[in-house]
Amino acid sequence: MSDPMTDVGPTRTPAYAVRLRRRYAAERRFRLAGLGAVVFSMAVLVFLLVTMTINGVGGFQRTTLLVPVDFAAANLTAPPADASLGIAIRSLEDQRLPQVIAANVSARFGADAAEQVSPDAWRVAAEHIIEDPGLLDRRVTLDLPVSQNLAAAFAGDGHADLKPLADRLAANGALTDRLDWGFLARSDATDPQLAGIWGALKGSILTMLVTLALAFPVGVLAALYLEEYAPRGRWTDIIEVSINNLAAVPSIIFGLLGLAVFLGLFPSLRSAPIIGGMTLALMTMPVIVISGRNAIKAVPPSIRDGALAIGASPIQVVFHHVLPLALPGILTGTIIGMARALGETAPLLMIGMRAFVATPPGGLTDPATVLPVQIYLWSDEIDRGFVERTSAAIIVLLAFLLLMNGIAIYLRNRFEKTW
């Protein structure tokens, strides 16, 4: 059987065969390079996910001590039913609830164990009492967080002097690692055993709502005007080039702009979600304008011509035909822009959203932080307990980003039109 690569016909000289062989070899190298790039990208992604999962699993757990507490013998009084959470906790503190908890731990496990219970463990007991005042009439068993030192000794990581105590409590079945759903419901704290992400997560949600409320309508209207109404000329070209350049400006520049403009106008709202949302809206708007223009441009001219032919006005053509057909592309670009804004840290650091905030924000003007900044702050902590919390927070942030991208894909597939 003849070999087409080596057989030389009338028009295939030996030099031609060599060049052809080189071209095929170059194509094979190009394909291998592309495959290598895909494999490398997947390997990096898998490494990131595996590393985050291994380190983050511990962040969703908390080392607790199973303590029987005899509330009936303590003679505590339930706070008024209409009292706020803060007042109710203060009322129980005034009735010496911390000392009651310490005494019960000491009586059951010894004074050395009582010293290693978290100083804020009594707050866990207080929340149980507020939720169910009937606990004050009986003996109950509570899962109370221990100190980070005892938790580290239990994990076999440092604090060798506490290892015998950890082993003794573990042998009794009292000291265990339990799934900590409270990590998603608590706010920041100085003790990693008590730290949670709800405050940062709520701050992120409020900030994203402000960003969406400002960036989406302004971006869509700007895209509609530039694509449907703006006259073609030098000024329009300058505006288009400026918007394209704004989409590539480093995010910290928008942080400086927010610091100079928004905090200059509203200095009392430093680190508030409304200021963070306004700053991120400046960064997201060019992305929405560009994606919106591309989506509007993709609508076939025959749609406009057909609508005009049956008597629709130009504004009816835009809002009844062009905009609904372009909406899937606009929404996809918007959500991708929002996902980028959610992961930004630099502009929010510039406007002061890096403070220690132990209480979830109650509104748009309350002090708050956001998930990326919370991760940045925890990654700076020297306590190893925060390493696992940092990885767990990264997992939550990645899950949030995957959810937003999933919504973008669903919207695109749900409303996509083909012509």
Image (cartoon, rainbow, N blue to C red):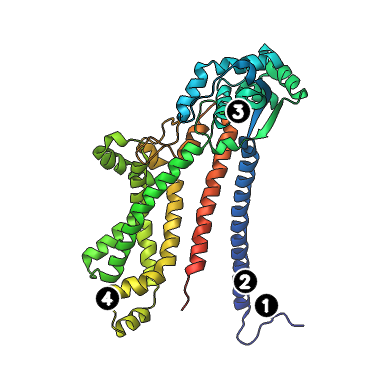
CB under 8 Å between callouts 1 and 3? no
Write down the residue under mark 1. 5
200, 340: nearer the viewer? 200
- Measure how far apart labels 4 and 2 are at the Cα level: 54 Å
189, 259: nearer the viewer? 189
- Measure how far apart labels 2 and 1 are at the Cα level: 10 Å
Residue lying at 52% horizontally and 21% vertically, measured from the top left: 92
Point out the frontmost of discs 4 and 2.
4
Write down the residue under mark 2. 24
Q: Closer to the N terminus: mark 2 or mark 1?
A: 1
Element assignment for label 4: helix
Q: Amino acid at mark 4?
A: Pro
Q: Amino acid at mark 3?
A: Gly
CB under 8 Å between callouts 3 and 4? no
Q: Residues within 10 Å of mark 2 (few under 14, many from 20)?
A: few
- Measure how far apart labels 1 and 4 are at the Cα level: 62 Å
Write down the residue under mark 3. 134
Q: Residues within 10 Å of mark 1 (few under 14, many from 20)?
A: few
Residue 314's disc is 4
Q: How many marks?
A: 4
